[in-house]
């Protein structure tokens, strides 16, 4: 790969002009944009796909389409595990660092079951995986996969375990064994489910490759703490015809934790900054190995597993296999994942407008906040806790919090007055009293002048809303 090609793989080097020069330049507006340059800009920002350009899909521009597809190809290959609506997409990363560009396809977390567990235990763990959910800033945090591990070394036991799991979940599966015969027995139970096969090694790669090709499954490649071998295995498997690969450089929770983090980082750097196609694949981590080490209690093992998992989410892991189903171990991890995989270019915002809590009437209080998602959901929760039927006016502050919105002139008296007018709240209440956040007190007078509403300055923190309404609202 030439230096120019390497640079073109990086998002910083790809400009709208590069894309525009390969578009039909007809300004036909079939894509929904005003012109081809606007479309090219959105393509570079990954806001639209080149497939939305109808002329580009014709025979005349076939060569341009292929060239654009190559230019826009992510540094880390994107692939799917599973089938249908429940399939999980992993990889697809464009850059190494999140501040350069948003990360796509959040880390998929799998909870394990083994073929030595009782039916009751298997079903219980599958149920916990399904039922794990938490609403965080308007997003549902969930687990995505189930890993079935062979402990018995018995193909029939493994097949039965895989079948039992598949009958009770539509989540994608990871089949875990280094024995091709055992993996094949599991694949026979779910021949069209497209699970991830874990894993091919230097000893079994050929047999595992045959299974991956036969059942059209992605294949994990394992070479613990040996990136040279890992790269060599990838090259061999690609030449053999296996295209959907996942890299396993090994996870070492204690003495080798430094090596683990270093290996994950080197793989992603090679793909994103050096254009190394052989390492441009999703990475799988196995924090579950923390449970193989001596520990004072299961809680200590779960804590170590969660610690390793959080480090790997920060260090480019695309899939994690875990054992603990405890909420205290999984919730912080999923929140961390959600925070990392938000778009750093865009504030996390909710739609502006009027919200109601309970069944408010003409005498109900009217409160105000910004459309920064974290602020909104915190305020909404605190209003709900009061049990007082209320209106909440959500002002468009371009996704900024109250204090920064006021300081940066994103939330002004003008925007508040306009929000009051657009919401038509004056038709819903007979009073003209607006409760604003304490951190917006500096614009209270301006709001009164522009809106003709009386402004009540509320608490600086929304946790004080219940007490404020109880004492101040009549």
Image (spheres, rainbow, N blue to C red):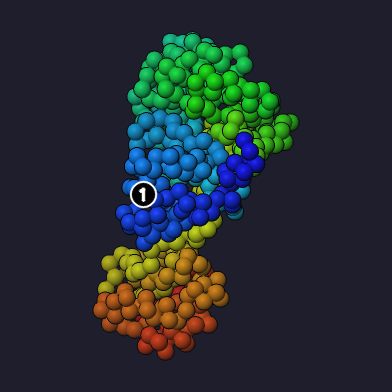
Q: Residue furthest front?
A: 60
Image point 43% across, 84% down: which residue?
Answer: 447
In front of the other: 145 or 430:
145
| Residue 120 % position (x, y) | 41, 23
Examine the rendering and report whether any part of residue 47 can be seen: yes
In front of the other: 50 or 243:
50
Q: Quadrant of the C terminus?
A: bottom left
Examine the rendering and report whether any part of residue 303 can be seen: no
- Height in image: 157 above or below 77? above
Quadrant in the rendering for residue 164:
top left
Quadrant in the rendering for residue 254:
top right
Image point 52% across, 18% down: which residue?
Answer: 240
Q: Quadrant of the N terminus?
A: top right
| Residue 297 % position (x, y) | 63, 31
In front of the other: 298 or 332:
332
| Residue 111 % position (x, y) | 49, 31
| Residue 143 % position (x, y) | 46, 38
- Height in image: 210 above or below 298? above
Residue at mark 1: 53
Q: Secondary structure at mark 1?
A: loop
Image point 44% across, 58% down: which residue?
Answer: 37
In front of the other: 100 or 329:
100
User: Relative to 127, is 209 on the left or the right?
Assistant: right
User: Relative to 350, is 111 on the left or the right?
Assistant: right
């Amino acid at each position: 790969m030439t230096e120019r090609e390497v640079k073109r793989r990086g998002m910083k080097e790809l400009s709208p002009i590069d894309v525009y020069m390969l578009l039909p330049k007809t300004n036909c507006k079939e894509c929904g944009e005003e012109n081809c340059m606007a479309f090219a800009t959105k393509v570079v920002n990954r806001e639209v796909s080149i497939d939305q350009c109808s002329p580009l899909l014709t025979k005349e521009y076939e060569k341009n389409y292929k060239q654009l597809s190559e230019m826009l190809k992510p540094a880390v290959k994107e692939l799917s595990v599973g089938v249908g609506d429940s399939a999980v997409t992993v990889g697809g990363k464009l850059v190494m660092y999140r501040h350069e560009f948003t990360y796509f396809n959040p880390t998929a977390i799998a909870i394990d079951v083994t073929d030595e567990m009782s039916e009751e235990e298997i079903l219980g763990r599958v149920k916990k995986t399904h039922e794990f959910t938490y609403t965080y800033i308007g997003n549902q945090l969930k687990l995505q996969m189930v890993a079935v591990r062979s402990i018995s070394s018995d193909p029939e036991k493994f097949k039965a375990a895989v079948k039992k799991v598949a009958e009770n979940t539509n989540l994608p599966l990871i089949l875990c064994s280094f024995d091709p015969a055992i993996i094949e027995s599991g694949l026979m139970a779910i021949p069209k489910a497209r699970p991830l096969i874990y894993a091919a090694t230097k000893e079994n790669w050929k047999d595992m490759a045959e299974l991956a090709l036969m059942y059209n499954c992605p294949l994990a490649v394992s070479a613990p703490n040996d990136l040279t071998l890992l790269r060599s295995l990838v090259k061999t498997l690609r030449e053999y015809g296996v295209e959907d690969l996942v890299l396993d450089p090994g996870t070492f929770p204690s003495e080798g934790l430094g090596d683990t983090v270093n290996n994950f980082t080197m793989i992603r750097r090679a793909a994103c900054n050096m254009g190394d196609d052989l390492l441009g694949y999703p990475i799988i981590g196995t924090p579950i190995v923390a449970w193989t080490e001596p520990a004072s209690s299961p809680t200590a093992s779960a804590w170590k597993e969660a610690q390793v998992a959080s480090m790997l989410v920060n260090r480019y892991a695309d899939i994690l296999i875990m054992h603990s189903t405890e909420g205290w171990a999984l919730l912080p991890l999923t929140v961390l994942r959600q925070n990392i995989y938000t778009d750093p270019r865009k504030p996390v915002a909710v739609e502006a407008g009027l919200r109601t809590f309970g069944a408010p009437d003409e005498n109900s209080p009217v409160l105000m906040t910004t459309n920064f998602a974290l602020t909104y959901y915190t305020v909404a929760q605190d209003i709900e806790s009061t049990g007082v039927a209320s209106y909440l006016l959500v002002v468009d502050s371009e996704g900024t919090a109250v204090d920064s919105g006021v300081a940066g002139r994103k939330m002004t008296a003008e925007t508040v007055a306009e929000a009051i007018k657009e919401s038509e709240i004056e038709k819903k209440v007979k009073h003209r009293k607006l409760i604003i956040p304490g951190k917006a007190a500096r614009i209270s007078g301006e709001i009164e002048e522009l809106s003709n509403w009386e402004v009540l300055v509320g608490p600086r923190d929304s946790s004080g809303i219940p007490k404020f309404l109880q004492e101040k609202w009549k």
